[in-house]
Image (cartoon, helix red, strand yellow):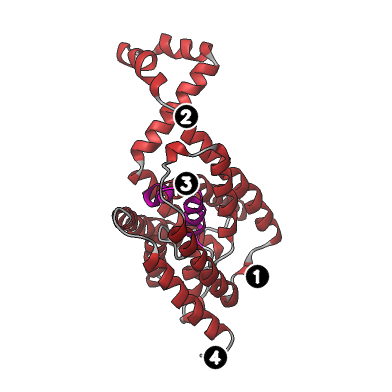
Amino acid sequence: MTNLQIIILSALQGFTEFLPVSSSGHLILLSKLTSFPDQGLEIDIAVHVGSILAVMIYFARDIYDMACGLTADLFKRFPKLQNLFIRISTPRLKDFILKQLPAYNPKLFWMLVVGTVPAIVFGLALHHFGMDWLRSTKIIGWNILLFGILLWIADHYSPAVRKIDDMTFKDAFLIGLAQCLAMIPGTSRSGITITTGRFLKLERREAAKFCMLLSVPAIAGAGLLVGWEIYQSGDYSNLHYVLSGIGYSFVASVAAIFIMMKWLKNYTFLPFVLYRIALGVLLLLHAYGHI
């Protein structure tokens, strides 16, 4: 592996993670269709971690609101805990706890928890049985094509009338269940969660926002798992590439989030659907030996 490969992988990951085109599929295809060696799951997850750091920066206000909502919920459930914090707080913080904190709603935090549970269960199962057999051009090609068409159906026929505040825990669980499919390369985590959100009649920007927030615990969990495995193995030979990948991916991901959210103010997902269909067809033709 070279620094050039890491830069290309990170840029590719950053720009495709939040576009519904399958970042993991593109990362695998880079090694299959070029002279670069397969970077492996370890590097794949590292560049994904850079992307979730970008989400946390872009949606810092939402994450702060969720943290306040969770704290308010805990204080409501455990009054003694609130009294303890009030006793050790400064006057300003005490005033915040008593007057402002109760106004924050923990609903979004708990919806993300509900949406993350299926990914944890499914991810641990896949990790146990191995995922290398899923990294084939045929599987990626079919998933890019078919799930791209499904995105068009959801976006074209479902009205955009709901916001995240209108979501129920059932909605969050269904989106989280759909996110499990994203562990199969070519599906696209953002693509399948946005597709499910649109089927649930979420507005395009709202579906994309929930998808991005939902990525944080799912990818962070995978990153911690890989980090623990690196620590246990004692092999730090790729650590430089892992850290570089996180940094480069972060920069590219910030740009991609800004572009995506601005685009969805006025436009649909049709360009991404057309791209997926074209890429899927080309990959399948290549996989079956026709080109």
Q: Which residues are magenta?
A: 188-208
Q: Quadrant of residue 233?
A: bottom right
Residue drawn at x 49%, y 56% as measured from the top left: 195
Few, some or many residues within 10 Å of mark 2 (<14, 14–19, 20+)? some
Looking at the image, residue 217 lies above or below residue 73: below
Instruction: Check disc 1 and report the residue beneath it.
Output: 133
**Residue contact between numbered discs 1 and 2, judged by CB atoms under 8 Å:** no
Identity, as a three-letter code, of the amino acid under mark 2:
Pro
Q: Position of residue 170 (x, y in %)?
A: 58, 40
What is the number of the mark on residue 106? Answer: 2
Is residue 5 rendered magenta in the image?
no
The CA distance from mark 2 to mark 3 is 17 Å
Front label number (3 vs 4): 4
The CA distance from mark 3 to mark 4 is 40 Å
Circle 3 SS class: helix
Dot 1 or dot 2: first in sequence order is 2
Identity, as a three-letter code, of the amino acid under mark 1:
Trp
Q: Position of residue 6 (x, y in %)?
A: 41, 67
Is residue 194 rendered magenta in the image?
yes
What is the number of the mark on residue 71? Answer: none
Instruction: Check disc 4 and report the residue beneath it.
Output: 290
**Residue contact between numbered discs 3 and 4, judged by CB atoms under 8 Å:** no
Principal secondary structure, stretch drawn in magenta: helix
Dot 3 or dot 4: first in sequence order is 3
Residue 178 relative to residue 70: left or right: right
